[in-house]
Image (tube, rainbow, N blue to C red):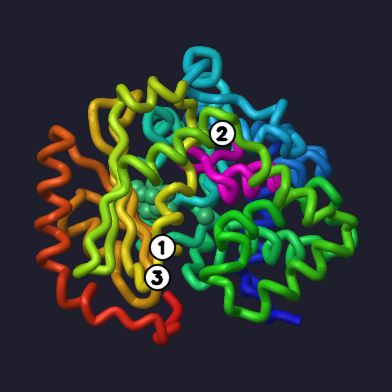
Amino acid sequence: MPENLLSEADVRRLSALLDESKHIIVTCHVSPDGDAMGSVLAFSHYLWRKGKDALPMVPNIFPDFLKWMPGTERVRVYEKHEGELNPLIAAADMIACLDFNAPDRLLGMQKPVLESPARKVMIDHHLDPSDFCEWRLSRQDMSSTCELLYRVLVQLDGLEPLTYEEATCLYTGMMTDTGCFSYNSNRSDIYYTVGQLLTKGIDKDKIYRNVFYNYSADRFRLMGYLLYVKLEIFPEYHASLMTLTRAEQKMFSHKKGDTEGFVNIPLQINKARLSIFLREDTERNCIRVSLRSVDDFPCNRMASDFFNGGGHLNAAGGELTCTMDEATDLIRKALKQYAPLLKEGSQMNTKQE
Ligand code: 5GP
Ligand code: MN
């Protein structure tokens, strides 16, 4: 059985904060992914069973392929209902910040959250957590916030009361943040946790299909277009680049989340070490940069050196305010500068983050 993550003092403090709170907003980073939605919904279900008035609230819309998750009908999207939601944020007793490490990851929700007198707690697995919460659990060794949250919930109340809905949401985040247990997933604890979640009757095969066999035809054709027309391969750097403009997104009736996961695909190319994806944002005037790597290539360093961003060793992102041509020029510059680390590429090194 894995060791307890929380000290006794931490358990007491978190329990006391929860006891003192009735109205609790549960939130996550902008453009929520499976781990963000999984942790927000699992924690909301937990709070509902404890009789709390919990409100899952996300900064902007979440992808359609996560709509099947239990509880999504109760999720409020801040961006769509700012006026109505601001007073609820201001009046909350607690704001639970899940799967993000800094308030700017809340975009427009940042200001009301920071201004709210509500006590903030953070449960997260990203690097460099910032200091805006009364209580914080930040563990970069955890594969997902959902894995971390599972450990917290079990430590607070034990496994027995954990529900099917909570387990389903927790498993979803663990599965999506590890690429279906294909990266960041060598710790044996992960599989102990999965085993425990299965005792709650979750259908992990169905969860897989719900997430990954649930795409729109438009997304599927967009994927084909990107791979056939837009993929540029740099064999000398063991790297690749895909770009997607606003006009191209329109051609494929792009909806939020439609490009989720595309950046991972070129890593399937023999000897690939780095995949870069550039997408013109449709809401803001910028280009979103996504980086993925295998082995020890540091995406986070490249993201902070060149793309105003950061992240993890093997998954990082950032953004640029320039034209797509300027952005691709910058990519070439970045590849050139990182050539020594890219060229040495051996896939034998399985060092973890
Ligand atoms: P994605 O490529 O999925 O947008 O982001 C992958 C990871 O990179 C995220 O989990 C996050 O840790 C990090 N990341 C993405 N965008 C940014 C950004 O603009 N700034 C920083 N610091 N990190 C980012
Ligand atoms: Mn996560």
Disc 3 crowd rating (10 Å Cα; few below 14, some 14-19, many 20+) is: few
Q: Which residue is mark 1?
A: 267
Q: Nearer the viewer, residue 301 or 183?
A: 183
Three-letter residue code for mark 3: Asn
Position above or below: 320 against 90: below
Instruction: Indicate yes or no whether the magenta region holds residue 28.
Output: yes
Q: Which residue is mark 2?
A: 63
| Measured Cα–Cα span from mark 2 to mark 3 | 30 Å
| Measured Cα–Cα span from mark 2 to mark 1 | 23 Å
Q: Nearer the viewer, residue 243 or 51?
A: 243
Query: Are circles 2 and 1 on residues that touch, CB within 8 Å?
Result: no
Three-letter residue code for mark 2: Pro
- 142 sits to left or right of 325: right
Rendered residue at 67%/72% (across/down): 190
Position above or below: 29 against 334: above
| Element at label 1 | helix
Position above or below: 341 against 24: below
Q: Quadrant of the C terminus?
A: bottom left
Q: Which residue is mark 3?
A: 270
Residue 19 visible in the picture: no
Magenta extent: 25-43
Question: Is the C-beta of the residue carrying label 3 under 8 Å from the nearest atom of ligand 1?
Answer: no
Position above or below: 158 against 205: below
